[in-house]
């Protein structure tokens, strides 16, 4: 289960679809975390849950 936490982040710039950003802003605000924090946690969750073939193809 995904759980939003407060963690230290590094700032990076990415282009994201407007609708996705709006959804993420709403979630971040409701959980009282920064949007950057939510993006970081979402990316970590996605990376941690790649299937084994995707991980192998990426050399992980």
Image (cartoon, grey):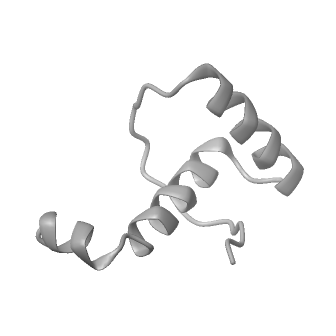
Considering only vertical position in the picture, is 32 above or below 23?
below
x, y percentage for residue 52?
Answer: 28, 79
Total marks placed:
0
Q: Which image quadrant for residue 42?
A: bottom right
Considering only vertical position in the picture, is 26 above or below 60?
above
Residue at image location 44% in from the left, 73% down from the top: 49
Q: Is 24 positioned to the left or the right of 13 in the image? A: right
Residue at image location 50% in from the left, 28% down from the top: 16
x, y percentage for residue 26?
Answer: 82, 39
Q: Is 59 positioned to the left or the right of 47 in the image? A: left
Residue at image location 65% in from the left, 43% down from the top: 35
Query: For the view shown, which residue lies furthest in the front direction?
Result: 53
Q: Nearer the viewer, residue 35 or 48?
A: 48
x, y percentage for residue 44?
Answer: 46, 65
The N terminus is located in which quarter? Answer: bottom right
The C terminus is located in which quarter? Answer: bottom left
Q: Is 30 positioned to the left or the right of 22 in the image? A: right
x, y percentage for residue 29?
Answer: 83, 44
Q: Which image quadrant for residue 31?
A: bottom right
Q: Nearer the viewer, residue 29 or 45?
A: 45
Query: For the view shown, which residue lies furthest in the right direction?
Result: 30
Considering only vertical position in the picture, is 47 above or below 17?
below
């Amino acid at each position: 289960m995904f759980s939003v936490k407060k963690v230290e982040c590094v700032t990076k710039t990415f282009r994201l679809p407007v609708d996705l950003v709006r959804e993420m802003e709403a979630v971040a605000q409701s959980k009282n975390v920064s949007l950057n924090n939510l993006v970081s946690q979402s990316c970590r969750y996605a990376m941690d849950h790649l299937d084994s073939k995707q991980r192998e193809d990426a050399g992980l």
